Image (tube, rainbow, N blue to C red):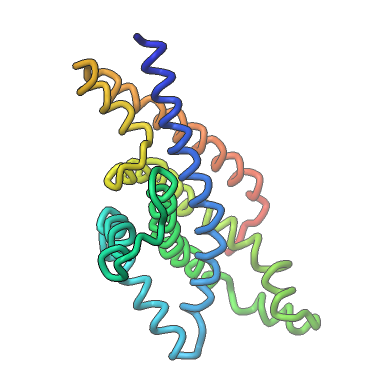
Amino acid sequence: MFLNVTLALLSGFLNTLKLFVLTLVFSIPLGLLISFGSMKRLRILKYPVRFFIWIIRGTPLMLQLLVIYYGPGIILKQNIWGSGDTGRFIAALVAFVINYACYFSEIFRGGIQSIPVGQYEAGQVLGMTKSQIFFKVILLQVIKRIIPPMSNEIITLTKDTSLARVIAVYEVIWEGQSFIKSAGIIWPLFYTGVFYLVFSGLLTLLFGYAEKKLGYFQTK
């Protein structure tokens, strides 16, 4: 029984892991773009972007999952996500990417704006372009500053993936709960916590290592 439960939970955890990785792959660059939009001096761009961030950060992720999955079918009378497991997974991924991109954008914005203006000015004096200043002077310092808040959000993401079950995405908790109905046992549900703890522990070690490696950037 223990082996069967473990294999079932591993299958669910692979879906969890896939959702986690793809969310990071798409939400981190999107979050950086959104942060640039929220810092623009052009009000016609800055204020709509900030309003959108406010809506996403101010509403529950579960609500966003339901709206994104069911909304197009109700409003457009057409399921744009496709049918079956793949369609539900894509809808969940879109919801997670939008949600976390907005959270990451605020972290990026705070990190970028925390760099002293003098460093931008020094780069300009040396004849560097704006993109050269950002990627060669600013970016690594920003990364150093945002690792702690980013690590918190990313570890939160590992747990938030369980919300995908609200639109029937078969992640690890879904698999654990299925044993309550099929076998009348509850311990597999608690067993799912081990997967989250181990994965979160590995991420904590990874971010701790990254922070230590960037320790030579003592920005003040």
- Residue nearest the observer in this picture, 97 or 113: 97
Q: Residue at x 31, y 33 (%)?
A: 174
Q: Quadrant of the N terminus?
A: top left
Q: Is residue 151 above or below residue 115?
A: above
Q: Is residue 118 above or below residue 59?
A: below
Q: In the drawing, does residue 105 fall left or right of residue 52? A: right
- Residue nearest the observer in this picture, 131 or 61: 61
Residue 31 position within the rendered picture, expressed as x and y whole percent measured from the top left: 50, 65
Q: In the drawing, does residue 88 fall left or right of residue 117? A: left
Q: Residue at x 55, y 43 (%)?
A: 207
Residue 89 position within the rendered picture, expressed as x and y whole percent measured from the top left: 42, 47
Q: Residue at x 67, y 52 (%)?
A: 216
Q: Quadrant of the C terminus?
A: bottom right
Residue 38 position within the rendered picture, expressed as x and y whole percent measured from the top left: 46, 78
Q: Could you say which quadrant of the image residue 97 lies in?
A: bottom left
Q: Residue furthest top?
A: 1
Q: Tag count in the figure?
A: 0
Q: Could you say which quadrant of the image residue 160 lies in?
A: top left
Residue 83 position within the rendered picture, expressed as x and y whole percent measured from the top left: 39, 50
- Residue nearest the observer in this picture, 21 or 90: 90
Q: Residue at x 37, y 11 (%)?
A: 2
Q: In the drawing, does residue 175 fall left or right of residue 140? A: left
